[in-house]
Image (spheres, rainbow, N blue to C red):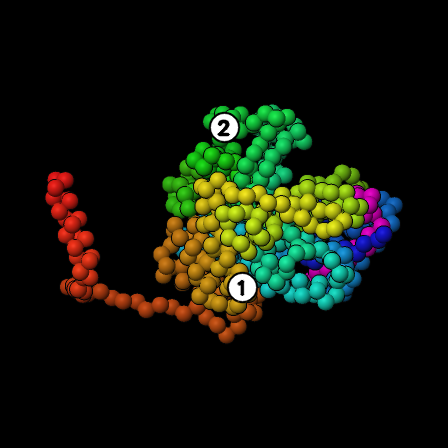
Amino acid sequence: MSRKIAMIGAGSVVFCKTLLSDIMATPALADSEICLMNRTEPKLRRMEAFAQRMVKENGLPTTVWATLDRCEAIRDADFVVVMIQVGGLEAYTFDYEIPLKYGVDQCIGDTLGPGGVFRGLRTIPVLIDIAGDMERLAKPGAILLQYANPMAANCLALGKIMNSGFVGLCHGVQTTLDLIAGYCGVAKEEITYTCGGINHMDWFLTLEHKGRDLYPILREVFERPEYYKNEKVRGEVFRHFGYFMTESTGHLSEYVPWFRKNRKALDLYCDEPGFGGETGAYYTYSKALATKYAKHDPLEFETAKIESRSVEYCSHILEAVATGKPFRFMGNVRNDGYISNLPDGCCVEVPTFADDTGLHPTRVGALPPQCAAACMTNVNSQILAAEAALNGDTEHVVHAMALDPLTSAVCTLREIREMCSEMLEAERAWLPQFAGKTIAPKPTIVIPANCQPVQVPLDPALAINQRFAKLIEQKTD
């Protein structure tokens, strides 16, 4: 039976092409109706023309059409695939350049930190609108496949209005398995594992090859300079926390306070080029791509031949729902007890099954306490960012940023407030929920040189405790 697949944000040329190719390479989906939707016409029409060329040159029964109208795309859809970037490169420039003025050095800037928080503020309201469109217009039981970053904050917000029927998708686990397989000298397909955590901070809880624990091998390999050099940040976290994580040095260095807080740390751990930790690596890449695509159609010289599928989960999930053949993947879902030592309602990334009855996340239980604690430092910021985006609360913007591990390692609270205010003013065009609202400055108090603190009477019990402490100190001496 033909299925309608709405692809929202189809101007994301490279990624959209990958997902289209995957879908068309899947026999069970070959007769699908695919509707491409984007807000800007030129990119959309180029993508539509290329997709139709793929259909023609591969002799497929797939129907492809495009629209600027999101409601038309979603109407009667079985699946809605979201890959939007609200504000594009223009907004992302503010996400990167303004924090750098305050000393917050970002490599990627799309998940946490100033860039991630403000990307979430721009994206969450649009996702909520898409969910509303689906409720009104899509087929009953339609599934939302969410690819937009910041993944965890976005899905946390979606989880507040959708009980089920959505999942956030990322390729961090698949690509990390490539690295593990290469480091351990085994075939990726032969590795069995259990993962649990949050997006971009998912921990390999078990890691085996034909019943043999791979962790001793991975630990030994990471102590060799030529291996450690590739992934210094991930290697350090592995050393000290005991479990391997799904994100590379460039990403992971932004989610923790230890590796980008000053020049010494950057030079020691983030000295590899590009996504190995380089300052502004993804911003530089995005600018270069935009410049290139402004001059040439990126699809002009691309082959339309469809071959094997990529590592992306999308087509496999659609296939499982269409055929009933179960597919296991790592999904970002609302935490309804799936990880017991992370808050209910936050977004967790856990093993999930898809079949013809829908999506079925599975319970991981408790993470190792140190891993859960590391995740919580990110979850706290995600919760506040989602609240700010949903309610237009400017104070929660500051709170989300103040609890971000990297930003709090670099800036004072006053600097964080000033940075948030500057970013809000620069990005107002994409933040309608904050219309007419500002981030209020806090008073500056000048303390005279001869100022003495006010003497406040002590509670008698406290005074006794202090005298007791002094007695112990004297006895110790």
Above or below for 458 versus 435 = above
Q: Which mark is residue 389?
A: 1
Q: How crowded is mark 2: few (under 14 residues within 10 Å), some or many (20 or more)?
A: some
Tell me the CA gap for discs 2 and 1. 41 Å
Q: Report the residue at 17% width, 48% height from top.
A: 469
- Residue 281 covered by magenta stretch: no
Count of marks, rendered view = 2
**Do the residues bearing badges 2 and 1 touch, measured as CB atoms within 8 Å?**
no
Which disc, if any, is residue 219?
Answer: 2
Amino acid bearing label 1: Ala
x, y percent for residue 443? 32, 69
| The residue stretch that appears in magenta | 23-40
Name the quarter where the C terminus is drawn.
Answer: top left
Which three-letter amino acid code belongs to the residue tagged 2? Arg
Q: Nearer the viewer, residue 337 or 22?
A: 337
In the displayed structure image, the side of residue 99 where residue 299 appears, left or right = right
